[in-house]
Amino acid sequence: MKGLVFALFAALLLVPAATASPAAAPQRIVSLSPTATEDLFAIGAGRQVVAVDDQSDYPANAPKTKLSGYTPNAEAIAGYRPDLVVISNDANGLVSALHRLHIPVLLQPAANNLPGAYAEIAQLGSATGHVAAAKRLIASMRARIDGVVGSLPKAAKGLSVYHELEPDYYSVTSKTFIGQIYSLLGLHDIADAAPKAGSGYPQLSAEYIVSANPDLIVLADSVCCGQSPAKVAKRPGWQHISAVEHGDIVAVNDDIASRWGPRVVDFVKIVAAKLRAAANR
């Protein structure tokens, strides 16, 4: 939590005090963070957004451009005459480069948990003049997630999950944002006991996964890598995994499973629906 607080405090330092005032709300925002893009539109700041990066594919009406959040170019960004640029990392020394061009920057790193995600939404609300809308969104997300978690049957608690990032078995532990969601749902993450689990994103082996025998498999590589429950069921040796035997495999849109914005509610609902089916079997 200390790291999160420091990161958010540091981010606030990057934005001039005037930017946070509704009277001086930015009107030409550039977002180089897909999550921030979703947040901005969800709090009603979409009309103030003039450009988003090439990975910001939601909502559909976001002004997508060829700007890159991975290899950002300060001059290309400046071409949109922004009065605020929102980023998730300081790639290529972007913060310093934009400061030299006198362009305000808001750095919002990947959230570690739901409180961190809520804090970033609130921060965007303050920076763009949509404080009340941001508060409403946070309250709605919190209430909907709490409702889903509270509705789960007791039998769903304590089940194990394997979250697949890529077909070469990269996964997540409970220390990550998505791992925290699984903990909230009462799931045990099989990656927690894996070698190199300390990284938060260990690469597992097929043998390890089969041995762990997860009750639920969540595929976050269905779009990028074409993975599906049918393909997983055909993997050698996987037919006796509990999740495979009972059909408890769910493919989730890669973006929904990797971002920490408003659609995390959708992720929670999707996983919870499969958990209910497993618990009621």
Image: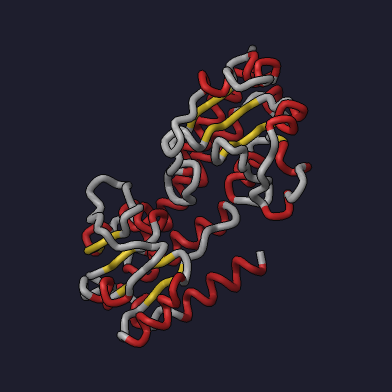
Q: Where does the N terminus fall, quadrant-wise?
A: bottom right
The answer to whether residue 116 is left or right of residue 162 is left
Towards the viewer: 152 or 274: 274
Residue ID at (48%, 74%): 11
User: Within the image, what quadrant is residue 127 found in?
Assistant: bottom left
The answer to whether residue 197 is left or right of residue 272 is right
The answer to whether residue 255 is left or right of residue 231 is left
Q: Where does the C terminus fall, quadrant-wise?
A: top right
Query: Residue 73: percent from the left, percent from the top?
Result: 33, 72
Residue ID at (21%, 74%): 79
Residue ID at (32%, 68%): 129
Instruction: Examine the rendered structure and indicate whether residue 122 appears above or below residue 13.
Output: above
The answer to whether residue 203 is left or right of residue 107 is right
Towards the viewer: 86 or 200: 200
User: Within the image, what quadrant is residue 160 found in?
Assistant: top right
Instruction: Examine the rendered structure and indicate whether residue 20 appears above or below residue 48.
Output: below
Query: Residue 68: percent from the left, percent from the top?
Result: 34, 62
Towards the viewer: 241 or 257: 241
Q: Residue furthest top?
A: 281
How many discs appear? 0
